[in-house]
Amino acid sequence: MKQELSYICPSCGKEVRVGESCSGCPAPRAAKTKKPRRSWEQDETYDGIDLPDDDFDYDEFVAKEFGGAPHRRIGVKWYWWVIGIILLTLMILDWLGVVAFC
């Protein structure tokens, strides 16, 4: 024996068989009317809006939005390179036994 499925219409509360539309509900008639526009759809009045061109300068945008320079180069000062080379040379000489540290 096959069981018939039904549901309660959310508009009028009448019990309706699955696969059929509610006979006493205005919902099917409302579906034939023009659908309201979604939020992402725009009117034709916005078609000629002046949007930015393709030559967008990101660095200029960041400077304008956040102020100051867009970014700063991070590097090691020259004197730290000299100190590192001197220390590396002393460590190699100590390892070779040329220089003896106490």
Image (tube, rainbow, N blue to C red):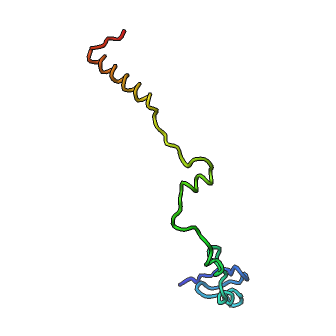
Q: How many marks?
A: 0
| Quadrant placement of the C terminus | top left
Q: Is residue 17 left or right of residue 97?
A: right
Residue 96 spot, x, y in % from top left: 26, 17
Task: Say which residue appears at 36% left-offset and 26% top-offset.
Answer: 85
- Give above or below for 83 relative to 101: below
Task: Say which residue appears at 73% left-offset and 83% top-offset.
Answer: 12
Quadrant assignment, res 40? bottom right
Q: Is residue 75 left or right of residue 96?
A: right
Residue occupying the far top of the picture: 102
Residue 74 spot, x, y in % from top left: 49, 40
Task: Say which residue appears at 63% left-offset and 88% top-offset.
Answer: 21
Residue occupying the far right of the picture: 12
Quadrant assignment, res 16? bottom right
Residue 35 spot, x, y in % from top left: 65, 84
Task: Say which residue appears at 62% left-offset and 54% top-offset.
Answer: 64
Question: Depth check: 11 or 36 in front?
Answer: 36
Residue 41 spot, x, y in % from top left: 62, 77
Q: Is residue 23 left or right of residue 75?
A: right
Question: Depth check: 27 or 100 in front?
Answer: 100
